[in-house]
Image (tube, rainbow, N blue to C red):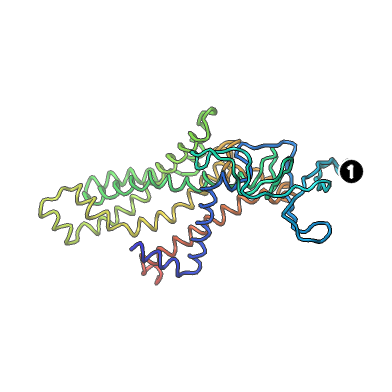
Amino acid sequence: MIKDVLKTLWKDKFAKIALIVLALIYFALLFADFLAPYTKDFSDRTMSYVPPSKVFTIDENGKLSKPYTYNYLREFDQNNLEIKYTLDRSQKHYIKFFSKGQPYKFLGLIPMKRHLFTTDNGGRIFLLGTDINGRDVFSRLLFGGRISMTIGFLALFVLFPIGLIYGGISGYFGGITDTLMMRFAESIMSIPSFYLLIILASILPAGMTSTQRFLLIVIILALIGWAGFARVVRGMVLSIKSREYVQAAKSIGASDLRIILKHILPQTTSFVIVAMTLSVPSYILSESGLSFLGLGIQQPDASWGNMLKEAQEFTNILYRPWLLTPGFLIFVSVLAFNVIGDTIRDVLDPQSKMR
């Protein structure tokens, strides 16, 4: 079944593009330390709001040259009362590939100094400019994406086992057990999830590290999202439990738990795959929304949500559009997941496409 799904995804041109986009994003996030020219702790406050560096391949004589860039000079415009940056053309800074730069641990384990690209001594390269603290936006996008793009999958690993087992037990036993379990699930579903997240995130201790806050957000997202999934699973189990192979398992003395885990829940695999694919975008948006409001991942650690927060000022949108890049990546990632989810749904449930 998985092979058929992958073949269909690859044949569908939109799903194929979505797969390639997500593969490139996750590849870049996995090797972020190597691809980023600076480490996640880099900051140069003298370079606040520097525009993206200009890379030149043609020298002043019109001849082809090795890629190089110029540093920016910071000047204060007394007439307009604003800071301006101009290129310091007095010295070229050549871009070096696979060269030594700031030390880091590759995949968090192997000490390394090699980066995909850097500049020579004294040079600065900011492909997407810098933020208010002089931090490279390109590097922070890579490090921040690790949080924004993994939180959904981590939440699903908690949410789906709970929802599957809870919904399976409720639908299989029925009667008063089903009634009580579903009323509890409905009470969880009635809680406005986003407002609950805001309340819980706002009362978290201020001294918590971003890692601790990240794990708590994952748990919170999972504990308020399992109920709706469990209700759908329960409905599927109600129809599955009357089939012949389930009755045959009962007749040979199989335990209720074995019947649920071995014979009933595997029949919900198609729905689970589709639900997981379509659920990831919502968790990406939830984390980004919390971080945007200042209740998620805290500075100086990066996530796409708290990076986008800086772009909410009108002057930044107008004069520093590179700060909107995290919002573009969120949009592209969510769209790609939705395209793949819709395609998988059409494959596993042909009637949905007919409808």
- Give SS at disc 1: loop
Q: Position of residue 254 (x, y in %)?
A: 14, 50
Q: Residue at horizontal 69%, vertical 37%?
A: 133
The one nearer the camera, 211 or 296, is 211
For residue 187, what is the image quadrant? top left
Of residues 325 and 179, which is closer to you in this image? 325
What quarter of the picture does the N terminus occupy?
A: bottom left
> Is 10 positioned to the left or the right of 172 in the image?
right
Q: Quadrant of the C terminus?
A: bottom left
**Residue position marked by numbered label 1 in the rendering:** 79
Q: Position of residue 102 (x, y in %)?
A: 62, 39
Q: Amino acid at mark 1?
A: Asn
Residue 10 to residue 82: above or below: below
* Residue at left offset 63%, top offset 47%: 138
Left or right of 305, for residue 346: left
Residue at x 39% of width, y 72% of height = 354
Say which residue appears at 45% left-offset and 41% top-offset: 218
